[in-house]
Amino acid sequence: MFTLNAICVVPLQTVVTARTRRHLAVGTAPTRFLLLGLLLYAGSFVLMGTAGLVYGGVLVAVVVFSLAETFATPMVDTAFAALPGTRPLVESFNLRQVAVTLGESLGSFSGGALYLLARSHGAVSLYWTVLGAFGVAVAAAYRREPIS
């Protein structure tokens, strides 16, 4: 179970990279792939919540999570490099490092704390469902803005 993500990412990354490359070549914005990754992450969380943590449901959620990872992770550098403005490329990458460092640290801490709180109240499925709904809400809010 713990290696399923790694097993899925390797073949999925090859397919996703080929398709992404074709879309980028015709002008698709890298942020679209980040948004797709976010929606897939949210979908995997909703699956965790609705599957009631049944083994088969968890496996499907891990596969969807792995697919999300293949879209989102490689596009982070590309999306930050494509930020509008006349800033030097190194500034964009420094901004990426700050955003990732803060985001992952705060996200891990708050997510872990909320998960433990949910678990102590017997609300693990609710935790995953709410987390997924939050991801969909963030993606919906982003979609209101034009994607460059």
Image (cartoon, helix red, strand yellow):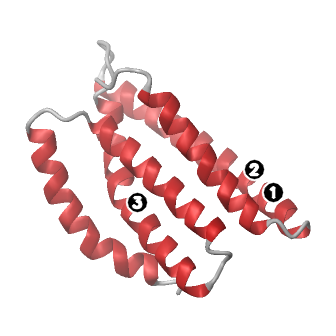
Classify mark 1: residues with Cα within 10 Å, few (<14), some (14-19) or many (20+): few
Classify mark 2: residues with Cα within 10 Å, few (<14), some (14-19) or many (20+): few
Q: Badge 3 is on which residue?
A: 69
Looking at numbered disc 1 in the image, what kind of residue is underneath it? Ala
Q: Earlier in the sequence, mark 2 or mark 3?
A: 3
Q: Earlier in the sequence, mark 1 or mark 3?
A: 3
User: 10 or 102: nearer the eye?
Assistant: 10
Q: CA distance from mark 2 to mark 1?
A: 5 Å
Placement of the C terminus among the 4 image quadrants: top left
For this orientation, the residue located farthest to the front is 50
User: 107 or 12: nearer the eye?
Assistant: 12
Secondary element type, mark 3: helix
Secondary element type, mark 2: helix
Q: CA distance from mark 2 to mark 3?
A: 20 Å
Q: Which mark is residue 113?
A: 1
Looking at numbered disc 3 in the image, what kind of residue is underneath it? Glu
* Residue 12 figure quarter: bottom left
Secondary element type, mark 1: helix
Q: Give the x, y percent position of residue 136.
A: 53, 44
Q: Residue at image x 37%, y 64%?
A: 67
Residue 44 drawn above or below residue 60: above
Q: Which mark is residue 110?
A: 2
Q: Give the x, y percent position of residue 66.
A: 41, 68
Looking at numbered disc 2 in the image, what kind of residue is underneath it? Ser
Residue 23 drawn above or below residue 46: above
Q: Which mark is residue 134?
A: none
* Residue 63 figure quarter: bottom left
Dots 2, 1 in contact, CB < 8 A = yes
